[in-house]
Amino acid sequence: MREHLLEKVPVSQLCDKHRISPVNFYNWQRQLVENGAAALERTANSENERRRRDAQADKITQLESKIEKKNAVIAELLEEHVQLNASYPVPKG
């Protein structure tokens, strides 16, 4: 198969060399095309799954930390806003 695809050796020549029928060659080629993606898929295993969960947990921790910092900044700004409003009298209507 490699010789045909990469080196452009004719199918008839390959079949003669390896003593196979062209029908078999084309069946194998069809199977390769149909199932080739499955051979390249990453299989889930416990180590991959653990790394994925750890990465996800790290991301969640980072996002929670960001939210806590933003909440602290918002609380500080609101406190300053309230203090500023308290120091200025509200004009009566």
Image: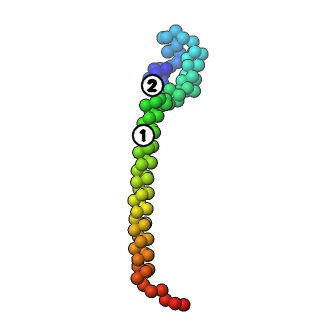
- Picture residue at 41% right of the left edge, 45% below the top: 58
Q: Mark 1 points at which residue?
A: 54
Q: How crowded is mark 1: few (under 14 residues within 10 Å), some or many (20 or more)?
A: few
Q: Secondary structure beneath disc 2?
A: helix
Q: Name the residue under label 2.
A: 6
Sequence-earlier tag: 2 or 1? 2
Where in the figure is residue 50, as x and y percent of width and height?
Answer: 44, 35
Where in the figure is residue 31, as x and y percent of width and height?
Answer: 57, 22
**Disc 2 from disc 1: Cα separation:** 41 Å
**Front residue of this view, candidates 51 and 38:** 51
The dot on residue 8 is none
- Looking at the image, is mark 2 or mark 1 nearer the viewer? 1
The quadrant holding residue 85 is bottom left
The residue type indicated by label 2 comes to: Leu
The quadrant holding residue 32 is top right
Where in the figure is residue 4, as x and y percent of width and height?
Answer: 48, 21
The quadrant holding residue 69 is bottom left
Query: In the picture shown, does residue 28 fall above or below 54?
Result: above
